[in-house]
Amino acid sequence: MAHNFDLVIIGGGILGTSLSYFLSFLNKSKQIAVIEQAPRVAFHTSGRNTGKVHAPYLYNPEKKKMFAKAAFYGYEMWKTYSKIKDLPFKEDGVIEVSHDKKGTKVLEKYLKWGEQNGLNEKDIELLPQAELKKIEPEIKCHSALFVHRDASTDYSILTKSLMKDSKQNGIKFLLDTKVTDIKKQNDKWKIILNHEHEIFAKFIINAAGGESIDIAHSVNVARNLTDVHFRGEYWKAPKEYYNLTKTSVYSVPDFPDYPFLDPHWIIRVDGKCEIGPNAVPVFSPYGYKRSENLKEFVPKMLEMLGSGARKAIFDKQFQELAVNEIQSSMSKTVMIDRVRSFLPKIEPHKITEKGTAGIRSSVINDKGKFEPDVILIDDEMSFHILNYNSPGATGALPFAADIIHKLDKKGYFTNENFDAKCGPWKFNEIVEKISN
Ligand SMILES: Cc1cc2nc3c(=O)[nH]c(=O)nc-3n(C[C@H](O)[C@H](O)[C@H](O)COP(=O)(O)OP(=O)(O)OC[C@H]3O[C@@H](n4cnc5c(N)ncnc54)[C@H](O)[C@@H]3O)c2cc1C
């Protein structure tokens, strides 16, 4: 193993691996490593999500500008990449339903946001109940937004393929390897791996997902921010429900100010159906099991009470929501009832098997408010990507290209050929689209 790297990317999720993909074409001369604590890439959130390639209709073009742009171009890019690599990508659309007039007003707002974010009338349309009934007779709603430009995929497969390409172009992937300490030593970082080995790097990119805040804190960055973790759980539907609808169904969230979306009816890329996710507060980015949450309970509570999260925890609406979500975790019926409000045919007793849960980590600022967009912190010798949430998987490719462009402007990548072809794309052309 080489012990000196020009660049170390912490995190082999879809974001860290997308960064490595572009860098592998652009930076043939640099020694670059991706460090991932799990045995494979996309082991955590990137491989445990709903698998939708989202059109940008849910994102306020002002508050979630970067996510919206990345989702718009991400769709095109995943479509192209999946085609040339023969990977799963199904253009199956998504339907967002409202239950009443108030919800329909929200759908009208989503339609407007979608248009502002680049969608046209072929991509997205608002349908009255009667029109939707002709297409999807089992759905009960007041009105529906039919988003045709939405697709299903398997992000673990896409991430693995990006890793394969990156490795072929010379990037090193250190799997089963956890960054356990980072210290500045002269003009380099000394990085301790698995508490025993040490490597050195001139520059670090922190793409550590649910641990990105901890990595930032460990090098004295983003001390005013903290995070809260939510476990999104799924239930698998039995085969008899696979033809209940032709399209996945989402519903207008009851509390749009909070990062909890009501559970969806999901048709996965392989045709299997699931209900989920909810959003249960947990104490670790890996809190899939009770034992991990118990272990992390005290340190996480102490961290939260000493930060802006304290204000969020004591907010009454937040408490009510948390209780709702915990209830829907403890009681399958409560969660399924939320989906039955628009798909009444589903009978909770027929749903018996749990799906794979994924954890979302939302950043809270020192005022106790959830940060709506991704946070980028450009520090000397390191770059931190925090709050990289939904639709992070959709936007990972263009977003990663933009980060590399930002670092280039900082002067990090000198004499590199930014006109180079990265797989099917010219790097400069992606950057031009995303940074406009
Ligand atoms: C329930 C749920 C459903 C979602 N559905 C969708 C969807 O349908 N479509 C969509 O576009 N997005 C969706 N998202 C969002 C999307 O999955 C995330 O935005 C995206 O996966 C984030 O990728 P990442 O690479 O930043 O993080 P991660 O996938 O979490 O990767 C970070 C990696 O860093 C590693 N790491 C952390 N600390 C260390 C360390 N110290 N040493 C070594 N390695 C470390 C971790 O092991 C992890 O593998 C969903 C998210 C959730 C939770």
Image (tube, rainbow, N blue to C red):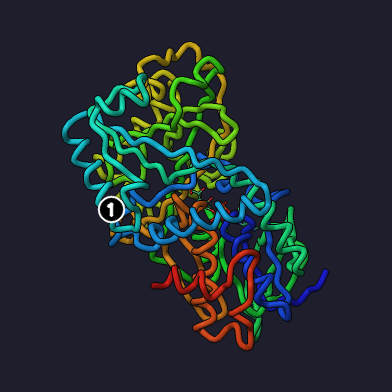
Residue at far right of view = 1
Image point (27%, 47%), residue name: 111
Nearer to me, 393 or 85? 85
The answer to whether 251 appears left or right of 106 in the picture is right
Q: Give residue 262's position: percent from left, percent from top.
A: 36, 34
Q: Which residue is mark 1?
A: 113
Q: Is residue 430 above or below residue 234?
A: below
Write down the quadrant of residue 31 in the picture: bottom right
Image point (24%, 51%), residue name: 112
Write down the quadrant of residue 88 in the picture: top right
Q: Is residue 250 above or below residue 436?
A: above
Image point (52%, 81%), residue name: 380
Q: Residue 50, can we see it?
A: yes
Nearer to me, 415 or 349? 415
The answer to whether 323 appears left or right of 165 in the picture is left
Q: Give residue 149's position: percent from left, percent from top.
A: 42, 46
Dot 1 amino acid type: Trp
Q: Is residue 250 above or below residue 428?
A: above
